[in-house]
């Protein structure tokens, strides 16, 4: 046995393959076992990645497991994370960490009481592109961010995910599914949010699955599929966030931030890489020179071309933080604030009123190229 922390996975669905494939790139931990309510899913994943298949209880009591990655569906996240913490193990959860602030606060209390870490995705803001944007912002390149726009709009998930139901149920929808990437990025760059307002709608009451194996089945839509939100930050910045699964095509950029001395143009925070562009006062928009960040290097082929994918970087950062006693970047405090933002946006969509947030957080530290390199296994 090595000094590496032992990691187990609960939830052996679609995203577990990404964690298992990419997890081996990182230093400080090794994935040893997996479990799922569906034991066949756990056995299949274990065979595919040469792991031990466990029952959920078996994984929670396994002495060689220090951290459990919670990759269950959103409405199981809080209960599964509670069980993991109660079993005396650290948690790294997929987003959203919980579907209510009450559940999130209960996890916060439990983690504090047991002196355990809880980390939560998304970790894409740790990517080379978004860290470069942070460096530029901190260096004063565009002055203070005053305003900006974020757009993440498409026509849903029922054409690709084999079990797309959860995307259209409470706990899913674009605000809780893709919103976390944008809110985590904005917290990373601008800090905490003070209040939000939103308009929301559901364009179609049903969705027809066109992926396999459930082609032709109907899903009842139970959560808004379009939300236009206003985010008022403690810093004074006001940002609009439009998320939708009712749009076939659009021409909006993912993230544009307008500062007192210039503008920053960021790639999709659902990914780790991409080109950051900037302009000064009245100057042309130009690419920001890349800085050889290890989490910006393309390592996967995708339909739109090569892409950087370092999913599990947030877990690796949490492992390093446990070992050195520092704070982890995808922290419980920030994830709780992100849930507060997202749930308050949904609430405002229902009532039409501004919602004041009851949580806050700090910005995470910049993750520069040298420190990011230490999170990777030596070649
Ligand atoms: N699929 C993606 O591309 C993607 C990307 C980013 C994040 N995520 C997030 O990852 C999570 C999982 O997504 P997915 O696409 O892998 O879903 P999935 O439906 O493919 O897999 C979820 C798995 O969790 C298991 N499960 C559910 N409840 C459980 C419980 N209480 N105990 C043990 N196992 C349980 C299910 O049996 C299933 O095998 C979601 O929160 C999703 O938002 C998914």
Image (cartoon, rainbow, N blue to C red):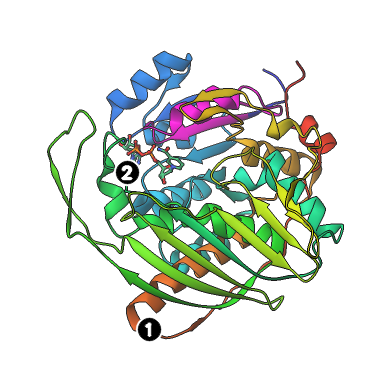
Q: Position of residue 111 (x, y in %)?
A: 59, 56
Q: Which mark is residue 1?
A: none
Is residue 22 inside the magenta stretch? yes
Q: Please report the residue visible at 53 percent of the width from the left and 45 percent of the height from the top.
A: 270
Residue 265 lies in the magenta stretch:
no
For the C terminus, the quadrant is top right
State the residue in front, 372 or 319.
372
- CA gap, disc 1 and disc 2: 27 Å
Binning the other alpha carbons within 10 Å of mark 2 as few (below 14), some (14 to 19) or many (20 upward) gives many
The image's mark for residue 157 is: 2
Closest to the observer, 373 or 263: 263
> Which image quarter: residue 39?
top left
- In this rendering, is residue 379 above or below 149? above
Q: x, y (%) of residue 184?
A: 60, 56
Give, as a single range, the part of the protein colored magenta.
Answer: 6-30
10 relative position to 185: left or right: left
Q: Residue 358 at x, y = what percent?
A: 56, 78
x and y, in percent, of residue 305 in the image? 54, 27
The reply to whether residue 332 is in sight is no
Residue 352, label in figure: 1
Is 247 on the left-hand or right-hand side of 102? left
Q: Residue at x 31, y 35 (%)?
A: 160
């Amino acid at each position: 046995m090595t000094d590496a922390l032992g990691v187990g996975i609960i939830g052996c669905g679609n995203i577990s393959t990404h964690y298992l494939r990419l997890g081996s790139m990182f230093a400080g931990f090794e994935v040893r076992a997996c479990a799922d309510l569906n034991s066949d899913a756990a056995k299949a994943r274990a065979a595919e990645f040469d792991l031990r298949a466990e029952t959920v209880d078996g994984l929670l009591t396994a002495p060689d497991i220090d951290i459990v990655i919670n990759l269950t569906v959103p409405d199981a996240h809080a209960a599964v994370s509670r069980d993991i913490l109660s079993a005396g193990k650290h948690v790294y959860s997929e987003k959203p960490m919980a579907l209510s602030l009450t559940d999130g606060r209960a996890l916060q209390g439990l983690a504090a009481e047991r002196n355990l870490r809880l980390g939560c995705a998304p970790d894409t803001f740790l990517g080379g592109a978004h860290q470069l944007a942070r460096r530029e912002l901190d260096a004063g390149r565009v002055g203070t961010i005053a305003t900006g726009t974020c757009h993440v709009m498409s026509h849903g998930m029922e054409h690709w995910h084999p079990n797309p139901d959860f995307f259209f149920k409470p706990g899913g929808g674009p605000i809780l599914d893709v919103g976390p990437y944008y809110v985590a990025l904005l917290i990373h760059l601008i800090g905490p949010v003070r209040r939000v307002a939103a308009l929301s709608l559901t364009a179609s009451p049903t969705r027809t699955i066109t992926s396999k194996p459930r082609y032709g089945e109907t899903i009842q839509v139970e959560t808004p599929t379009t939300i236009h939100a206003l985010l008022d930050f403690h810093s004074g910045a006001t940002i609009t966030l439009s998320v939708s699964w009712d749009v076939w095509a659009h021409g909006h950029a993912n993230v544009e931030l307008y500062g007192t001395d210039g503008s920053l143009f960021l790639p999709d925070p659902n990914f780790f890489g991409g080109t950051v562009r900037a302009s000064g006062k009245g100057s042309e928009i130009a690419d920001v020179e890349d800085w050889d960040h290890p989490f910006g290097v393309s390592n996967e082929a995708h339909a739109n071309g090569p892409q950087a994918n370092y999913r599990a970087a947030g877990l690796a950062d949490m492992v390093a933080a446990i070992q050195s006693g520092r704070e982890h970047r995808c922290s419980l405090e920030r994830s709780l604030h992100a849930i507060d933002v997202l749930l308050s946006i949904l609430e405002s969509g229902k009532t039409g009123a501004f919602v004041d947030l009851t949580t806050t957080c700090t910005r995470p530290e910049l993750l520069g190229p040298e420190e990011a390199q230490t999170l990777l296994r030596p070649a």
